């Protein structure tokens, strides 16, 4: 039994090496923000705080495997500073300016209650949009399973009974976070009598997410690069949107997101209706 557990643990660590928890954490962040932004009444329910705690724990475990990479990046940054690299120095200066502005805005917001709500809402919305592509991004993480199992080291039963189900669960959880985020936006727009904007908002967010997935998977950028290195983001965006192949990949990703979202949306709403029927004592088969 111990050898079996050890083999499973080794296979999971070899193929996933912590990414599965970290990517799920990044997927859950916009979902939790969507409840805070668009469904505030649900924020105060008993499940929201435990959900935040669980998400933080997932992020902590996922970050643990990335500590060597973080220290390596910090070491490289320090070496570039010592070598007099102007680009690195400018990035640090820009990051310092962003932090100073954030602190200044925070202090100003605490003095004005109404203004604080407005600025905090719009700031949270910007963070939500920046992190939203991380939720459907898990669809592309199939590459980890393909790479990890292509060497023939992992046994067939391990792939079929452990790794594939684990991978599918991670994909479903991450994409469900995306679906719930957009459903919360739908709820918000409907509550504001803006039902006609639901479909355009969904399509626009699918397009932004498809673009974000391309930047993350192929260019290897992160959501926080928008603040850390905005000039590179702008240059890469212009280069991407003027090239045929990236636009084709983004277009295909947009179609996949739209189809998968519609399917998962129907499943999610169906489960919600089924739960409501069960609570009301209605037999769905009658």
Image (cartoon, rainbow, N blue to C red):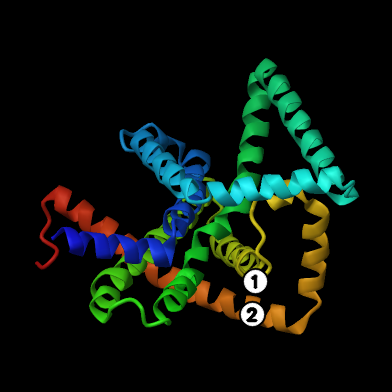
Q: Taking the image as drawn, is residue 169 in sight?
A: no
Badge 1 is on which residue? 218
The residues bearing labels 2 and 1 have C-alpha atoms spaced at a distance of 10 Å
| Res. 171 image quadrant | bottom left
Question: Viewed as shown, does residue 212 lie left or right of 97?
Answer: left
In which quadrant will I find the N terminus? bottom left
Query: What residue would you read off at disc 2?
Result: 249
153, above or below 45, in the image? below
Q: Residue at x 80, y 41 (%)?
A: 92
What is the residue that sits farthest to the top in this orientation?
Answer: 111
Say which label, 2 or 1, has the lower sequence index: 1
The percent coordinates of residue 249 (x first, y second) are 64, 80
Q: Position of residue 120 (x, y in %)?
A: 63, 33
Looking at the image, which is closer to me, 175 or 58? 58
The residue lying at 38 percent from left, 31 percent from top is 44
- Looking at the rendered image, the quarter that the C terminus falls into is bottom left
Element marked by disc 2: helix
Give the image location of residue 274, x and y in percent: 21, 59
Give the image location of residue 241, x and y in percent: 77, 73
């Amino acid at each position: 039994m111990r050898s079996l557990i050890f083999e499973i643990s080794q296979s999971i660590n070899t193929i996933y090496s912590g990414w599965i928890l970290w990517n799920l954490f990044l997927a859950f962040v916009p979902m939790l923000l969507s409840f805070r932004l668009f469904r505030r009444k649900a924020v105060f329910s008993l499940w929201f705080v435990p959900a935040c705690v669980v998400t933080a724990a997932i992020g902590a475990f996922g970050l643990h495997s990335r500590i060597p990479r973080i220290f390596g990046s910090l070491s490289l940054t320090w070496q570039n500073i010592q070598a007099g690299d102007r680009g690195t120095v400018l990035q640090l200066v820009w990051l310092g300016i962003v932090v100073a502005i954030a602190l200044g805005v925070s202090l100003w917001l605490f003095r004005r209650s109404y203004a604080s709500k407005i600025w905090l809402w719009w700031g949270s919305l910007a963070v939500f949009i920046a992190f939203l592509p991380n939720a459907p991004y898990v669809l592309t993480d199939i590459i980890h399973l393909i790479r990890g199992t292509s060497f023939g080291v992992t046994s067939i039963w391990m792939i079929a009974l452990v790794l594939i189900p684990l991978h599918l669960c991670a994909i479903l959880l991450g994409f469900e976070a995306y679906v719930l985020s957009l459903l919360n936006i739908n709820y918000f727009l409907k509550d504001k009598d803006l039902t006609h904007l639901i479909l355009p908002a969904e399509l626009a967010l699918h397009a932004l997410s498809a673009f974000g997935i391309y930047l993350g998977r192929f260019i290897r950028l992160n959501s926080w690069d928008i603040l850390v290195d905005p000039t590179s983001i702008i240059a890469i965006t212009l280069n991407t949107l003027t090239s045929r192949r990236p636009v084709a990949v983004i277009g295909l990703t947009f179609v996949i997101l739209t189809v998968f979202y519609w399917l998962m949306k129907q499943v999610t709403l169906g489960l919600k209706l089924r739960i409501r029927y069960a609570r009301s004592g209605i037999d769905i088969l009658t």
